[in-house]
């Protein structure tokens, strides 16, 4: 009997505390209805939700694409967006991923921001986000990637993704239909896209993704795996210097070094006027004529450093 | 008057019809008194051979001679014919033209030479001396057989390359094409075919050297359906172009090999995985496949035997690692070309998890020859464990660059000096690199080594796919090792840390050494690193990428030490490690170096010795090139 009394008192205290907490949670913590205004690449939208949940969960419920590889645990820093108003103060869990400049612009982590009042946001488009992430080599999580906002156009880099016109859309559709029934269609499709458009335009890949019901990230993975494809437009004259072993021992490096100052670009780049792209390839199988290069599909060899300025001059003359 | 193809295509409906077809085609070819064959391989085309071909046709027509461009099955004799051929292999001397039946062999033919060639051949019954191959003693070789480059070779697999028109299947029929397939379908069971392959001792020519017969046997026994035959034409080794020449020069031989393999194994579908960098090979392959289908040699009911098999072409996209068999299959299946661990043999679970035989282009090209001439004949060539012949691409600092075929067991010395003509300008031989990025560099004391799979491996190199890069004193082995590691680092799929980061670490060390910041312990570190990379990598790229480093460390350690201890590059390749200096005693004060220096690094006044300002010098080497008095070193 004597031992039961203390146990009973403690249980009663715990029970009371629990009830108080439950009441508090239901009534005090309720933030009521909150209006969420979102601006993103598809336009502006608005919806009303029950306050209390994180931005990430609310936006995902609404069907928006927010990268969140740690599923909202605040350890990846990928779910960045711009809170114009109503987000409250930045939390210590976010400061690890957001630099001072970004904080000034109102960048927050969606998984950490709790919606307690009406809130206005801007969400960057997914592809710019992924691009920015992959371009950043920094280990400092605060400089992983950032986005800027320019007026009402929501883009993360200054090149807007152009939309395809009807002719281009039909071209893409033809390519996809041609290979649709192939069990492993993606590489033949990319070959045809590259042949038709001269490179792999982002807008085309997005359409392929829609048509094939294949995630864009999967297509990007294949496109960036192979050396042949370029995600940037290629110049009118693609000069590819062979750097295979035979060409290397016969001076291929020197040939590239001769082109670079002449064209004003480094190997792998395209000139501003889109006339020349300088690239290298590891062996086109013309080792008997080493060192060789190709101008578009035209093989030329044996090359020497002296012939380089003549070649560029010839191409420029023919182009006129 | 140019006559177009006038023959209807008659598909072969029984193996026995092949003999009659061969005779018909042979007669059509013989009806031409003279044939001008112009090499139309990629390298000769780059040199202008197609212009020579067009000019030949025009000029012959202008003289009122009937030029038959394609084989005619009807009609009488014609005076002359002109056609294209595949790569002869003597790329240094292109464009090449061969006159049949004389066998006259012309080198470096230009469009302007055409009138002389025609007059000499058709009117004077003679030759144009200047266009013949010139031997080192000044004498001229009239035919290929007399050219040392060809005399030392045994051109069996490459027999058709340079002698037939790869764009016309009937030419292939005329030289016993598809006789082997007819023999298989008529006289042999699938088991017989596999047995014959095993008896021949044919080993894979792509680098692995696995016995082809054993591979076919495993696939034949496998229970999965349908079965696949894959031809690996993703010749990624820099410096190798054997497969390109074979497909451009005689694609039907490869196709026939694949069909025979399919018959032996019981396969229904074939794929040729071709590199994107070989557009001409792809075009010729498509054409050859279409023609084979027209004649009932591919598709359903091949030669009326009830056996179905067809081949499609799959283009690669510039990834060296896709030459590895599991990566290749992943690429076809639409995945990134990353190799996978080999829990199952590909012959049980390969492409799409079905039994697959994957062989190299050259391996398949050997198959019809083995069936026609017999496994015993084939096994009589070569060494005990490496039968037959091998095609090598002989390139680099060598007089006769090109594609050669020799019996297995031929010594390196014979290949490099007798066939290859030695090093240009009589410079001393330094090293030969065999086997591409997976192989190693061998020094002069290994020149008498016979070339075969096992012996090359024993000395730290590898046969690989057959690339042979010869280097003289002007090549720095540290630079070459760095080049190969850079290549492997670039092409690594990235799956295994040992390959991905190990190659980056090796590259880092080699770059430091080449920039003069090498340390003594670097050599041991590199050796350790190499063994670790070999142990921990999953696929062939990783396990063999240390070979260039290990072999050069073994045979050329002194050169590494010169880079590290003396901060000197003896071959004058690693720019921070050497300087160009004027030898004042030899300088004749001509000022040529001063006038040609692109970076104003030479001080010279009239009647004074030149001097090089090291700070401005960009080490381009032009001063040394232009000096006529050997006054720059």
Image (spheres, coloured by chain):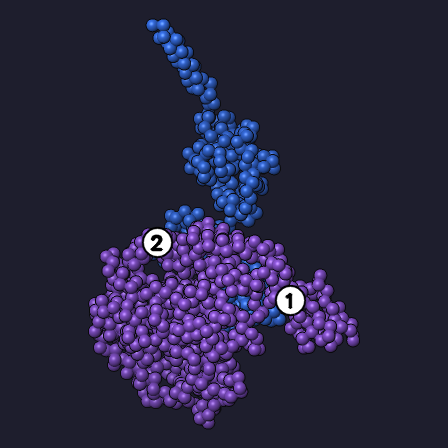
Work out how far the residue at label 2 is from the one at label 1, CA to CA, in angstroms. Answer: 48 Å
Residue located at (61% from left, 69% from top): A305
- Asked whether residue A238 appears in the rendered view, the answer is no
- Asked whether residue A163 appears in the rendered view, the answer is yes
Q: Mark 1 — on which chain does it sit?
A: B
Secondary element under disc 2, as helix, strand or loop, is loop
Q: Which chain is purple?
A: B
Which quadrant, please, contains the C terminus of chain B? bottom right
Which quadrant, please, contains the N terminus of chain B? bottom left
Instruction: Report the number of discs.
Output: 2
Q: Earlier in the sequence, mark 2 or mark 1?
A: 2
Same chain for labels 2 and 1? Say yes or no.
yes
Residue located at (42% from left, 49% from top): A218
Q: Quadrant of residue B269?
A: bottom left
Q: Residues within 10 Å of mark 2 (few under 14, many from 20)?
A: few
Q: Which residue is mark 2?
A: B342
Q: Position of residue A47 (x, y in %)?
A: 46, 31
Residue located at (41% from left, 60% from top): B323
Q: Which chain is blue?
A: A
Q: Which residue is mark 1?
A: B620
Residue located at (35% from left, 8% from top): A4
Residue B119, which numbered label?
none
The answer to which of B338 and B294 lies nearer the viewer is B338
Q: Position of residue B426 (x, y in %)?
A: 56, 78
Q: Position of residue B205 (x, y in %)?
A: 38, 67
């Amino acid at each position: 009997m004597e031992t039961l009394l203390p146990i009973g008192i403690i249980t009663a205290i715990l029970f009371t505390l629990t009830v108080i907490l439950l009441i508090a949670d239901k009534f005090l913590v309720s933030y009521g209805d909150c209006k969420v205004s979102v601006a993103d690449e598809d336009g502006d939208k608005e919806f009303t939700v029950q306050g209390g949940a994180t931005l990430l969960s609310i936006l995902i419920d609404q069907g928006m694409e927010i990268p969140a590889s740690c599923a909202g645990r605040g350890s990846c820093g990928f779910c960045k967006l711009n809170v114009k108003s109503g987000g409250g103060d930045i939390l210590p869990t976010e400061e690890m991923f957001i630099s001072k400049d970004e904080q000034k612009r109102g960048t927050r982590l969606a998984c950490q921001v709790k919606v307690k009042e009406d809130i206005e946001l801007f969400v960057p488009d997914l592809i710019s986000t992924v691009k920015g992430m992959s371009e950043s080599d920094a280990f400092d999580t605060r400089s992983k990637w950032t986005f800027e906002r320019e007026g009402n156009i929501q883009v993360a880099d200054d090149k807007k993704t152009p939309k395809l016109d009807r002719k281009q859309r039909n071209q893409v559709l033809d390519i996809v239909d041609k290979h649709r029934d192939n069990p492993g269609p993606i590489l033949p499709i990319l070959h045809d896209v590259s042949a038709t458009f001269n490179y792999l335009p982002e807008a085309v890949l997005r359409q392929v993704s829609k048509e094939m019901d294949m995630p864009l990230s999967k297509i990007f993975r294949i496109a960036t795996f192979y050396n042949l494809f370029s995600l940037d437009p290629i110049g009118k004259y693609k000069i590819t210097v062979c750097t295979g072993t035979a060409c290397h021992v016969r001076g291929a490096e020197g040939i590239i070094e001769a082109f670079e100052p002449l064209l004003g670009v480094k190997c792998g780049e395209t000139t501003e006027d889109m006339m020349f792209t300088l690239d290298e390839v590891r062996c086109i199988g013309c080792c008997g004529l080493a060192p060789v290069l190709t101008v578009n599909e035209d093989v030329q060899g044996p090359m020497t450093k002296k012939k380089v300025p003549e070649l560029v001059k010839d191409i420029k003359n023919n182009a006129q | 008057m140019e006559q177009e193809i006038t023959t209807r295509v008659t598909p072969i409906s029984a193996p026995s019809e092949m003999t009659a077809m061969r005779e018909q085609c042979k007669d059509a070819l013989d009806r031409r008194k003279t044939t001008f064959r112009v090499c139309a391989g990629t390298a000769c085309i780059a040199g202008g051979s197609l212009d020579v071909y067009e000019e030949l046709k025009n000029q012959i027509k202008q003289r009122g001679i009937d030029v038959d461009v394609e084989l005619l099955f009807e009609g009488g004799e014609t005076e002359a014919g002109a056609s294209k051929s595949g790569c002869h292999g003597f790329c240094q001397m292109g464009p090449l033209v061969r006159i049949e039946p004389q066998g006259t062999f012309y080198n470096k033919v230009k469009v302007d030479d055409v009138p002389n060639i025609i007059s000499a051949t058709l009117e004077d019954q003679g030759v144009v001396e200047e266009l013949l191959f010139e031997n080192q003693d000044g004498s001229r070789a009239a035919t290929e057989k007399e050219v040392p480059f060809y005399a030392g070779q045994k051109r069996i697999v490459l027999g058709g390359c340079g002698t037939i028109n790869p764009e016309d299947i009937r030419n292939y029929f005329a030289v016993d094409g598809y006789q082997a397939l007819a023999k298989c379908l008529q006289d042999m069971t699938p088991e017989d075919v596999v047995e014959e392959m095993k008896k021949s001792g044919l080993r894979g020519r792509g680098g692995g050297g696995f016995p082809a017969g054993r591979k076919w046997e495993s696939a034949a026994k496998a229970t999965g359906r349908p079965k696949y035959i894959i031809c690996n034409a993703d010749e990624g080794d820099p410096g190798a172009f054997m497969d390109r020449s074979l497909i451009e020069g005689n694609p039907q031989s490869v196709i026939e090999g694949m069909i025979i393999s399919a018959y032996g194994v019981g396969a229904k579908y074939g794929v040729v995985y071709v590199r994107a960098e070989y557009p001409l090979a792809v075009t010729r392959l498509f054409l050859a496949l279409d023609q084979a289908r027209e004649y009932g040699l591919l598709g359903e009911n091949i030669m009326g035997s009830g056996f179905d098999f067809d081949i499609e072409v799959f283009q690669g996209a510039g990834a060296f690692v896709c030459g590895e068999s599991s990566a290749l299959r992943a690429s076809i299946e639409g995945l990134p070309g990353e190799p996978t661990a080999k829990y199952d043999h590909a012959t049980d679970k390969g492409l799409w998890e079905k039994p697959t035989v994957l062989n190299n282009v050259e391996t398949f090209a050997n198959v019809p020859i083995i069936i026609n001439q017999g496994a015993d004949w084939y096994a009589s060539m070569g060494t005990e464990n490496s039968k037959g012949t091998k095609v090598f691409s002989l390139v680099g600092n060598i007089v006769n660059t090109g594609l050669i075929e020799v019996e297995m067991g031929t010594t390196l010395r014979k290949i490099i000096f007798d066939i290859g003509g030695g090093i240009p300008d009589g410079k001393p031989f330094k090293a030969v690199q065999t086997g591409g990025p997976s192989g190693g560099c061998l020094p002069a004391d290994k020149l008498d080594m016979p070339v075969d799979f096992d012996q090359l491996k024993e000395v730290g190199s590898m046969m690989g796919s057959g690339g042979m890069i010869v280097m003289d004193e002007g090549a720095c082995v540290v630079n070459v090792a760095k080049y190969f590691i850079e290549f492997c680092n670039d092409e690594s799929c990235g799956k295994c840390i040992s390959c991905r980061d190990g190659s980056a670490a090796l590259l880092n060390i080699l770059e430091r050494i080449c920039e003069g910041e090498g340390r003594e312990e670097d050599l041991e570190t590199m050796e350790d690193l190499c063994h670790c990379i070999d142990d921990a990598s999953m696929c062939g790229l990783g396990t063999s990428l240390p070979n260039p480093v290990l072999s050069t460390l073994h045979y050329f350690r002194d050169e590494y030490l010169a880079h590290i201890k003396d901060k000197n590059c003896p071959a004058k390749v690693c720019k921070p490690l050497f300087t160009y200096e004027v030898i004042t005693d030899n300088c004749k004060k001509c000022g040529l170096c001063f006038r040609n220096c692109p970076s104003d690094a030479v001080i010279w006044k009239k009647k004074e010795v030149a001097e090089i300002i090291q700070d401005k010098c960009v080490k381009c080497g032009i001063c040394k090139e232009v000096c006529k008095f050997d006054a720059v070193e």
